[in-house]
Image (spheres, helix red, strand yellow):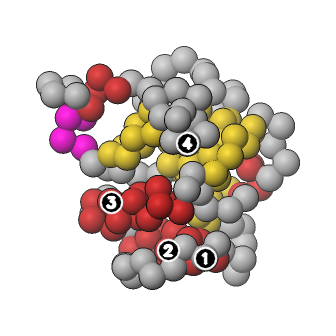
């Protein structure tokens, strides 16, 4: 899987805040690269809870990227909360996982927008930033500010 891939993970069990077991949508931001074994993937999840990001919502001041079905492969309007650290998941859990449905890929422009917001957020460790930066470079998303 390459950076920018959008997928739905049915029966995703690693919920950060509890709640019901439901499919989770992710953007694959990148991974630790071929040298690290076992490797880890960095997954950013989206939410359809748009009210949380509106005026008066509990995430009103969070940095976000918005997606809609007309400008992406998402099926509903959703938000990627940049101020939320990505999930780091073992690559072995992702490869050949029958619960994962690849839905498409976000555009290079959307990836650059995500990167520029991530790098400014201060929420990601330098190690994760370097891994994501390298992952973007591997698919020719170059010229990005280095962490």
Give the structural element (helix, strand or loop) at label 1. loop
Q: Which residue is mark 3?
A: 117
Most foreground residue, 133 or 65 = 65
Residue 91 covered by magenta stretch = no
Mark sitting earlier along the chain (4/3): 4
Query: Residue 90: x, y in percent?
Result: 68, 56
Q: CA distance from mark 2 to mark 4?
A: 22 Å
Most foreground residue, 87 or 24 = 24
Q: Which residue is mark 4?
A: 72
Q: Which residue is mark 1?
A: 140
Mark sitting earlier along the chain (2/4): 4
Do the residues bearing badges 2 and 1 touch, measured as CB atoms within 8 Å?
A: no
Do the residues bearing badges 2 and 3 touch, measured as CB atoms within 8 Å?
A: no
Give the class, few, some or many, for how many residues have Cα within 10 Å of label 3's Cα (few <14, many ≥20).
Answer: some
Give the class, few, some or many, for how many residues have Cα within 10 Å of label 1's Cα (few <14, many ≥20).
Answer: few
**Which residue in the rendered view is the most extreme toward the front?**
70
Q: Would you place residue 69 above or below residue 38 in this image?
A: above
Q: CA distance from mark 2 to mark 3?
A: 13 Å
- Judge from the rendering whether residue 113 lies leftward or rightward of residue 72; answer left or right: left
Start-end of magenta stretch: 58-62
Q: Which residue is mark 2?
A: 133
The quadrant of the image that shows the N terminus is: bottom right
Residue at x-position 63% and y-position 51% = 105
Residue at x-position 54% and y-position 17% = 20
Give the structural element (helix, strand or loop) at label 3. helix
Mark sitting earlier along the chain (2/1): 2
């Amino acid at each position: 899987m390459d950076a920018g891939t959008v997928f739905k993970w049915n029966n995703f069990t690693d919920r950060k805040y509890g709640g019901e077991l439901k499919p989770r949508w992710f953007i694959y931001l990148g991974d630790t690269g071929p040298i690290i074994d076992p490797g880890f993937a960095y997954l950013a999840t989206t939410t359809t809870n748009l009210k949380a990001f509106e005026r008066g919502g509990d995430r009103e001041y969070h940095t976000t990227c918005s997606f809609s079905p007309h400008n992406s492969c998402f099926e509903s309007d959703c938000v990627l909360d940049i101020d939320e650290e990505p999930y780091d998941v073992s690559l072995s859990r992702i490869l050949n996982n029958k619960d994962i449905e690849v839905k498409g890929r976000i555009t290079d422009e959307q990836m650059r927008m995500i990167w520029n917001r991530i790098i400014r957020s201060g929420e990601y460790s330098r190690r994760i930033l370097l891994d994501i930066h390298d992952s973007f470079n591997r698919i020719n998303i170059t010229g990005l500010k280095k962490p």
